[in-house]
Image (cartoon, helix red, strand yellow):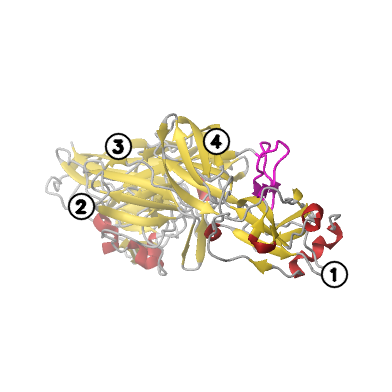
Amino acid sequence: MKINRKLIAVFAMMSVALCGCAPEENFGVDANVPTPSELAYDEIGSSESSISVCWDATAAVQAGATSFTVQLLTSAGATADPYDATVSKTVLVPKDPESTAIYDAVLFEGLLQGRSYWIRMRANYPNSIYSNWVTLNDTAGEPARIKVGHGIAGKDDPLTAQVKGGIGFAWVYFDTMVDTTYEVYNGDKKLESMVAQKTDTETTLCVGPLPLNTDFNLTLKAIAPYGEQSVSNLTGKTGDIWHLTRNVSPTNVAVGWTDLSGNGNANRAYHVQLATDPEMKNLVYDLDCVDGQADVVTAYGATSWLGKKDGSNYNAPPAVSFGQLTPDTKYYFRVMTVAGVTSQGVKMTFPLGNSMYSPVFEVKTEKSHVPAAKEILFEGFDAMAMQMDFMNMAAGTTPRIGSKANYTNPWPGITTAEWCVYPAATTHLFGTWGISSKAPFLDGNTTHKDSEVQNYVIGPKGGTLEGWHASDSFTAQQGYIKCGAGSETYNYLSTPKLTHELLKPEGTPCIISFKACPVLTDVCKATIELGRDGNYEEVVEFNMDRACVEYTDESNYLWEGKWTTYSAEVVLKPGDNVAIRIRQKRFLLDDISIVAK
């Protein structure tokens, strides 16, 4: 009988009998009766979820065959009928020679794309006589592996994979294969692996551990019932973790790591942990972190306050700053990527999905300030609860909450908090955060006498700054403060009245010093003012150097701040106030010190 291919399109409508009986032992096999011939895979009749096969039934029908049984096997070379592991269909030969019923083809539907099968069939005769099984073979005469949605998978269907380095781990991603297990090796060492994400078409494994900042060469092995495939020379380099130390306080550490997103955009969702032990059992922080950067409207990614590169907002590497820690103490950090987190309606993702944790990275807080001999005052801006670091471009660990004024509340021992925002809080001032409030100036006026700058007094949320006077142009950073107001004139910060016992009524010679870092200018002016009897007088003026090391002009620079210490001798009396006034709209200030000579 000639194969009727025109009717393949209606295979799904034909009547089939399901052979779902108990396993049989191939009795009744007669090697002398004709088998079906020319068993073939029908590419046209198959789809992404079905397999169609056809055969020549002529010889078997002429010999008296009454039906044909076709089976899909999940392994090659089966010799019995494992019905619990196969799909089996039997098509009947019509008794009426004029019937148009199809009995030289069959369609298996509802199959999972990518799954592999082998196909065999036989002719069935009266009195439980069966022909030998015949298999669907490839061009080499070997049993053909049929991959649903792909067809015959021969030797020209190799395993392929790609790799991307992570932080002490790597991602290996490849086409999804059904009924397959995977092993990844670094040389002879088998790596631990976890599924980062998986779809019907692609699988991503996260494998490790791997050393930080190291080249690697991996091998992927795919082990399936039909055999094993492998792909080698999956080369790349792992990222790194580093301790950010340009400017810190004794109660915080800032940690940065290699950007893993590959495109420097906002698709960077991480989970970070900080613990007091290298086993990471005693967690101090355990929270989702945005990508290390966010602007004040919570549009994650670059912000112009971090600088510009090639005319665009600079995308800094991800980083996080942990606050309210113990000085001179070791802590332990690790990070992982997160496929997706949602907090207060804002969703963050990571393109390659979840990862395992990075290796544990040790950091140590600085020692607390040790008072100098004859020290009258020291202010390192270390007591504020603003857990972020503009200079290090590190997000803070204050949770995302609704009220800005609550950000400055203490957060001792945050765990499982929603992610943080405002890495630099670059435009939110002391008054916005609830650190300071409007008050008369020391001379009784509402503004500084030489400007029209509104005066503020710093309250309890300023920590050791309580009672200081300031223009409303400062923001709290981790271990220093930043002036970010739009005006270039008369930004000032003043001490309360000094009452130290070393100050004598006749006057005590003192050395006043401070660290500063002006931004985006060649030179700016800094002045030390002395407040006495309700009046302020300028006593010393400095020319301050440019701060940014890497830049091309004022609109295109990268943050590499240069701190400079300025000092001068001033004679002070009990009840005096000392103010630092800087005629520059953007600068950083730290470590104000007054020491008697």
Please tell me which residue lies in front, 573 or 75.
75
In this picture, which residue range is highlighted in magenta? 132-157
Q: Is residue 582 visible?
A: no
User: With respect to residue 405, does 361 lie above or below?
Assistant: above
- What label sits on residue 498 in the rendered view? 2
Tally the numbered discs: 4
User: Which mark is first along the chain, 4 or 1?
Assistant: 1
Instruction: Give the residue number, with chain letter if any, for mark 3.
Output: 568
Q: Earlier in the sequence, mark 2 or mark 4?
A: 4
Q: Point out residue 508 in the picture as x, y percentages from the top left corner.
A: 17, 42
Left or right: residue 511 compared with residue 111: left
Q: Quadrant of the N terminus?
A: bottom right
Image quarter of residue 208: top left
Q: Amino acid at mark 1?
A: Ser
Which three-letter amino acid code belongs to the residue tagged 3? Ala
Give how far apart the Cα atoms at labels 1 and 2 are: 112 Å
Q: Nearer the viewer, mark 3 or mark 4?
A: 4
Q: Residue at x 68, y 52 (%)?
A: 131
What amino acid is labelled 4 in the image?
Ser
Q: CA distance from mark 2 to mark 3?
A: 18 Å
Report crowding for label 1: few under 14, some 14 to 19, many 20 or more residues within 10 A (C-alpha). few
Q: Earlier in the sequence, mark 1 or mark 2?
A: 1
Tell me, yes or no, if residue 421 can be seen here: yes
- Which element is circle 1 on? loop
Percent coordinates x, y for residue 311 in the rendering:
63, 43
- Label 3 and label 4: CA atoms lie apart by 71 Å
Q: Which mark is residue 99?
A: 1
Q: Which residue lies at the image location 15% right of the left edge and 45% below the top edge? A: 506
Within 10 Å of the Cα at label 4, are there few (<14), some (14-19), or many (20+) other Cα atoms?
Answer: some
Q: How packed is label 2: few (under 14 Cα within 10 Å), some, or many (20 or more)? A: some
| Residue under the image location 62 percent in, 65 percent down | 19
